[in-house]
Image (spheres, rainbow, N blue to C red):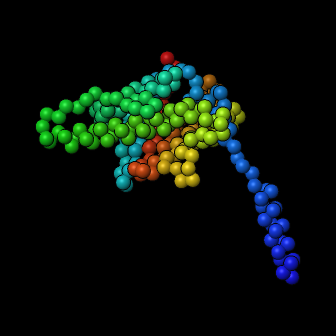
Amino acid sequence: MKNLTAALLVFLLFSCAGSQTVQQPSPPPPGCWLLQPVIYRLRQSARLEYQGKKEMLEGFMELDLTKDRAQLVIFNALGLTLLSIEIERHSYQLPETVSGSEDEAPANRRKQQFAAAVATAVQHIFFSLNSDRKNYCRDNPSTPAEFNGTPPRLTRISENRQKPTWIVTYHDYDNDPANQLPGRIILQNRKPDYRLTIWLHKAEVM
């Protein structure tokens, strides 16, 4: 009986080992909208959810995918400008805020924190795939991507971790093949914990 049990165990172990498959990351299709050498002018709205709060934002973006650079202006629900910022693949710039008094310093720090969060979100959503394209040739991308549909369209990118700190999903693609952009993009971030939903209302190629 013991020999039979041992034989079954060995059989099961080898069966499992033989059935395991290693999924290699597939390279992004050349038609992916984030890999096109174009400049987009985008109008979008966004909902930021954090610490049980929800904040609605509006914005205009010039997205230069030839240089991985974005110029973004963000407004609040009242139409007041909250931030004007230029973002590149690994950096960002905004007009320096000069504090005229000690009372203004906390506001400036909050603005800097908001600018850093916005820049990181834009880099994750719009620049990660192009930045990591060469690593797909080595089957070792740091931002694995998923594509679905015919033609294949980008639906997800994330950190290459078992528990990624950020995940971006792309939704609501138009059936019109001339319009390759998604209608809705969601960034789920864990550190810090927030969820950003972006709706693209208008896109023009410059």
Q: Is residue 2 above or below residue 98?
A: below
Left or right of 158 in this view: 153:
right
Q: How many tags in the picture?
A: 0
Point 51% across, 24% down: residue: 65
Residue 51 image point, x, y percent: 36, 54
Q: Is residue 155 visible?
A: no
Residue 5 image point, x, y percent: 83, 77
Q: Is residue 82 visible?
A: yes
Left or right of 74 in this view: 109:
left
Left or right of 115 in this view: 147:
right
Quarter that holds the N terminus: bottom right
Point 56% across, 34% down: residue: 132
Residue 60 image point, x, y percent: 40, 28
Point 69% across, 43% down: residue: 24
Q: Nearer the viewer, residue 19 or 119?
A: 19
Q: Give the quarter of the image for residue 104.
A: top left
